[in-house]
């Protein structure tokens, strides 16, 4: 109110109401005293002050509503994204069936010589977790494989990877070992663009010594051309042609050399390539069946011959190692959309992340890396590229390792989980069953799968 007359009328009206109110109180004041008090505090009765107070309370009251408005906007963007997915003819729902019994069972458990696993459906309507626990994949008993697959959008993707991963790894390792045993690595110079890999210039069964100067030149030329052809094959991305992932075809070519480091099998390279190849195979099948399911993958390979542990991670399942001194060493690190590197990649691909309870890619997926999820994968918003770490077990001296889906890590920190298992390692299931039920009592809403390997 800019008019002084209107302000005066309002002030007089307020003063009258104050006098009427005080008249009925035990400590009634004279009208003269009221006028004095009114004059003293008239600044607090001005329209500007009242408006400022109201604005302050409105902002305080609706402060929490701002996040709600943000979530509504994020849901709207997600709905628009899903509409675009539907527009290209992709199914939003899936009716995957379990390949190993009903997925409505309450619990699963398994026990090996030095390992144990326990899986709990928990409060979810279906069990989408899967696991692999093999203490030895060959007669030599020098390699063990342990893995967690945390499916989402159905169990199809988790079962697809579970059924194929171990066999492909086993065949590839056998093929590379056979190649090392039957090949002669004579050159000390590495192939162009390849580290720690040697060219095979001679083979006793195929290369003969030349008998004349002309034959020497021809032979040298053939060898040089062969080396160039090998380099071209090896430098080509293995994802360019799916046929190149067939172990039998790889064994016939020089492509197996990418899996040889010095005179040893490069287990990390095999695991990485097989994960990417399986993701391509899964996407091809998923597109044909309109199945948008996906899965995380936490894969640990124990090389007893060389005392190594190779761990590959795609997604937000997590592994830890506890050494003999009780120190906890992370075996993997979660892939979350809000991480700077992941967020940058998603943004550069034209995507976005939004917060809906947790941060999600395009408002949908709570992990930034996964196998499957082909609508998001087609737009490069999600990748299956694994992070791979190799641990020297001679240096670390592990007491046990533990792999688990994110349902456990919603309720336990790394240190808490290690301490809990360490005190129950002598139980029949090495503490896996106890900690899974403890997750449920702590309020975990997800499927929980826990795998423990005892190194004592």
Image (cartoon, helix red, strand yellow):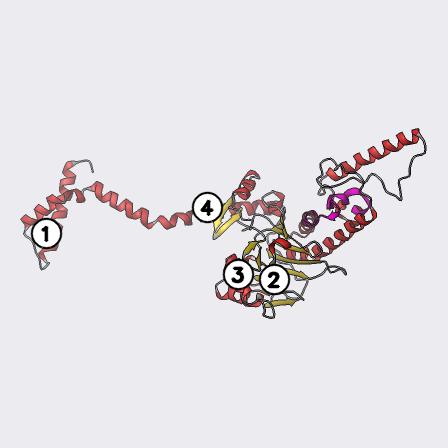
Residue, x 60% and y 62% (percent of image)? 452
Taking 102 as reference, is 233 above or below it? Answer: above
Q: Position of residue 53 (x, y in %)?
A: 25, 45
Rate crowding at label 3 as few (under 14), some (14 to 19) or many (20 or more) other CA atoms within 10 Å: some
Regarding residue 351, the answer to whether it shows in the image is: no
Camera-side residue: 387 or 406?
A: 387
Q: Where does the image place residue 56, in percent across and percent down from the top left?
A: 28, 46
Q: Can residue 357 be found in the magenta stretch?
A: no
Residue at mark 3 to residue at mark 4: CA–CA distance: 37 Å
- Element carrying mark 2: strand
Which residue matches tag 3?
417
Q: Which residue is mark 2?
A: 451
The quadrant of the rendering that contains the N terminus is: top left
Q: Residue furthest right?
A: 211
Q: Which residues are magenta?
A: 250-271
Determine whether the residue tagged by mark 4 lies in a helix, strand or loop: helix
Residue 255 in view here: yes
């Amino acid at each position: 109110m800019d008019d002084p007359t209107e302000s005066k009328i309002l002030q007089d009206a307020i003063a009258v109401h104050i006098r009427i109110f005080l008249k009925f109180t035990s400590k009634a004041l004279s009208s003269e005293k009221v006028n004095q008090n009114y004059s003293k505090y008239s600044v607090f009765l001005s329209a500007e002050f009242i408006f400022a107070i109201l604005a302050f309370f409105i902002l305080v009251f609706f402060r929490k509503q701002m996040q709600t408005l943000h979530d509504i906007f994020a849901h709207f963007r997600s709905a628009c994204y899903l509409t675009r997915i539907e527009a290209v003819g992709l199914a939003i729902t899936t009716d995957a069936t379990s390949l190993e019994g009903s997925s409505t069972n309450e619990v699963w458990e398994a026990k090996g010589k030095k390992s144990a696993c326990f899986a709990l459906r928990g409060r979810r309507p279906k069990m989408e977790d899967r696991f692999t626990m093999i203490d030895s994949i060959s007669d030599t008993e020098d390699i063990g494989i342990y893995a967690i697959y945390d499916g989402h959008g159905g169990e199809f993707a988790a079962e697809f990877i579970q059924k194929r991963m171990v066999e492909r790894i086993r065949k590839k390792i056998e093929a590379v070992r056979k190649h090392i045993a039957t090949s002669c690595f004579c050159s000390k110079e590495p192939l162009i663009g390849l580290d720690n890999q040697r060219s095979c210039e001679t083979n006793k069964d195929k290369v003969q010594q030349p008998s004349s100067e002309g034959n020497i030149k021809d032979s040298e030329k053939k060898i040089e051309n062969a080396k160039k052809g090998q380099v071209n094959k090896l430098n080509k991305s293995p994802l360019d042609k799916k046929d190149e992932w067939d172990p039998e075809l790889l064994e016939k070519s020089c492509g197996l050399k990418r899996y040889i480091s010095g005179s040893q099998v490069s287990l990390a390279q095999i695991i990485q390539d097989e994960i990417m190849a399986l993701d391509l195979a899964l996407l091809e099948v998923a597109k044909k069946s309109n199945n948008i399911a996906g899965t995380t993958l936490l894969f640990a390979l124990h090389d007893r011959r060389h005392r190594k542990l190779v761990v590959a991670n795609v997604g937000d399942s997590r592994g830890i190692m506890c050494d003999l001194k009780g120190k906890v060493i992370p075996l993997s690190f979660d892939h979350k959309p809000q991480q700077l590197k992941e967020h940058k990649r998603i943004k550069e691909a034209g995507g976005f992340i939004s917060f809906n309870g947790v941060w999600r890619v395009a408002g949908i997926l709570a992990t930034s890396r996964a196998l499957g999820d082909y609508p998001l994968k087609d737009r490069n918003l999600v990748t299956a590229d694994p992070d791979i770490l190799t641990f020297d077990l001679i240096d670390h001296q592990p007491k046990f390792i533990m792999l688990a889906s994110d349902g456990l890590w919603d309720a336990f920190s790394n240190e808490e989980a290690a301490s809990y298992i360490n005190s129950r390692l002598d139980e029949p299931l090495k503490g896996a069953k106890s900690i899974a039920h403890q997750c449920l009592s702590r309020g975990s809403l997800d499927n929980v799968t826990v795998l423990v390997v005892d190194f004592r």
